[in-house]
Amino acid sequence: MIENHIRLGSDDYNRIALRDDKRVVSYADVWDKVQEKSSALTGYKCVGLALDNSVDWVLWDLACLVQGVVVVPIPPFFTKAQTQHALQSSGCDGLIKDDGISPLPFIPVDLPLGTAKITFTSGTTGTPKGVCLSSQSMLSVAQGVVDMLGVDFAGVHCSVLPLAVLLENVAGVYAALIAGATVVLPSLRSFGSQYENLHSVLSTEKATSAILVPEILRLLMGQVVARAPLLDLDFIAVGGARVDKVLLSTARSMGLPVYEGYGLSECGSVVAMNVPQRDRSGTVGTILPHVKTDIIDGEIVILNPAFLGYVGAPHAGIFKTGDLGTLDDDGFLSVTGRRKNVLITSFGRNVAPEWVESKLLSFPDIAQAFVYGDGQAHLSALIVPSRPDVEIAAVVDRVNKDLPDYARISDFSMTAPFTPADGTLTGNGRMRRDRIMATRLNLQKESKMKFYDRLVKETESARQELYAVPQLMDGIKGKISRETYIAYLTEAYHHVRHTVRFMMAMGVRLPESKKWLHDAISEYIEEEKGHEEWILNDVAAAGGDKEEARNATPNLETQVLVAYNYDYIARQNPVGFLGMVFMLESTSIQIANKGADAVKGNLGLPQTAFTYLYSHGALDIEHLKFFEDLVNKIDDPEDQAAIIEVANNTFRLFANVLRSIPHEQEVRNVA
């Protein structure tokens, strides 16, 4: 069936059908290449497809459709757990990767009759939901796209989204092949982690069409401004989330031929689309010829959905999309928001957050926006700026002027980008609102906590791991030998002697904006000078050889602790060393005096053998207060994250240092 559709696509069989950076396949050769793949599918019933965008991905996909093998595309942004769930719940007995197909041990499951593909979308929950589609339903969508757009646009289609995203798979590749276009399939890596190379790829490939989600469109707009217009492009479909008409008009003024569409996996990817011949600003276009829709109680309802059901749950009848919308007299569909996302303010006003978000996103200064405030008097927003120097407050003021009182943003906070990788976006760019509420808003609350309190809270587990080390527990009780105590002092000498050097290295590497920390570093250096000699004097007072301790080779664990800190200061973030300071000082005030008292009493050692511990027990109480005041002034999220990271890691590394000290649970008195 699919062969017949695609054979109609190009009268010129020498025309290139598929191209990536490794191979080129003409229309004349497509089915020979598909048959080569088909032979490897013998005996398989359901296979996962986990490849980067490539000619191979498309050939394997077509081979599965031809052979009647159910294919389960695995999105590259899925976690291991999500991938495992998709493969196991579908009953995949094979997995296609770079080295070919290999068997899987999963038990076959009953799937709706006619299932050809299971597309998994992470949706609004962490567990992916498998949508079962027939080959006929997908081809109907692809043919509908071609019928609406026309074959005149069959030039060079560049796949920008992952092929495992149904929109790119069906409306991109299938439609392009039916129309007779050349499908260019760059590796996703070639675009860059933040699509920073998108303009270059589209320009080099002379792409005439592409499918983008709004976030990627905004990135491309910035690249066009910085570089040059993309004159070859004739059609860019934009979908996955609501796009404000101001943003679309701005993109078009840059020469980007953008047209908004709307779709769902349950409908085979596309329900409606604007095209050059039939376009209306502010709508998602007209309905594809084969799709039957209605608006019931304000909700968009599909009367003849394409899907056969979800994995484990067959479907029959109409499909309620959950999207709110309207259909005008000319057949143009408008999507106003999600029914379940509607916010009801404490004044009883209903607000679709997508409406307000689209207003914010109409300004290129804002890359992403999330509006919330259910049950509150006013709305709030989490905002991702498109660049560091943006005056977001000014943008919010401008947006508010065009909104009614009940829909205005009263306060906002900056946040890190929403991505599929951290679970805050689905693969096609839809916000997972529940996930954002559960994670980002909690982080916002935590950000209002003083940073020192966060540091204490987020290092609790690592700190308790240190306090559970037998050498430390027994030391606090005084149940260690003199040899163990001297061994401890020896290892302490070999990391304490680097403290001043650590501080100096930190100060040298601080950027200009962080030079205000120099005063604190100078104070630490003044306080810490010579402490390593105190330790050697304690060794001698305890009956050891101070020069032997000085010249000893420290245990590997001590060397790793020292090397980690030098490396982090030099290669990561010098401010992070304050995490090591926190580890040492917080540990000292907890154990130094108590441990010194117990060991001194049980071993009968003189007071002069505990200079280092007693001094740090007292000093570090003052130091820790100084430290608390200092780190509470650090408001850079990257610096805060670095301090927490180093603190957690050095608690664990110091625990290893203590574990490396020879120790028997017995007391041998010096007498």
Image: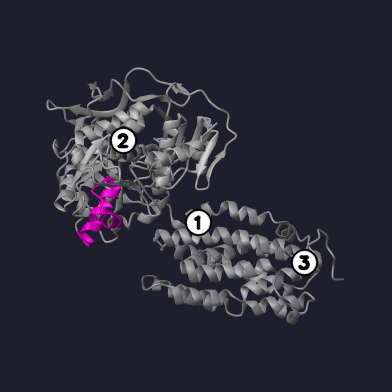
Q: Disc 2 residue type?
A: Arg
Relative placement, left or right, of 562 versus 317 is right
Can you say whether 541 is above or below 309 in the image? below
Do callouts 3 and 1 mark residues in contact (Cβ within 8 Å)? no
Query: Which residue, as the protein is rendered here, is positioned at the far bottom?
Result: 547
Q: Which residue is mark 3?
A: 484
Image mark for residue 88: none
Q: Which residue is mark 2?
A: 7
Answer with mark 2 or mark 1, whichever residue precedes in sequence: 2
Q: Which is nearer the eye, 591 or 379?
A: 379
Q: Which residue is mark 1?
A: 455
Do callouts 2 and 3 mark residues in contact (Cβ within 8 Å)? no
Quadrant where the N terminus lies?
top left
Residue at x 80%, y 76% (from the top left corner): 543
Q: Which is nearer the eye, 108 or 550?
A: 108
**Alpha carbon distance from label 3 to label 1:** 32 Å
Residue at x 71%, y 61% (from the top left corner): 659
Q: Disc 3 residue type?
A: Thr
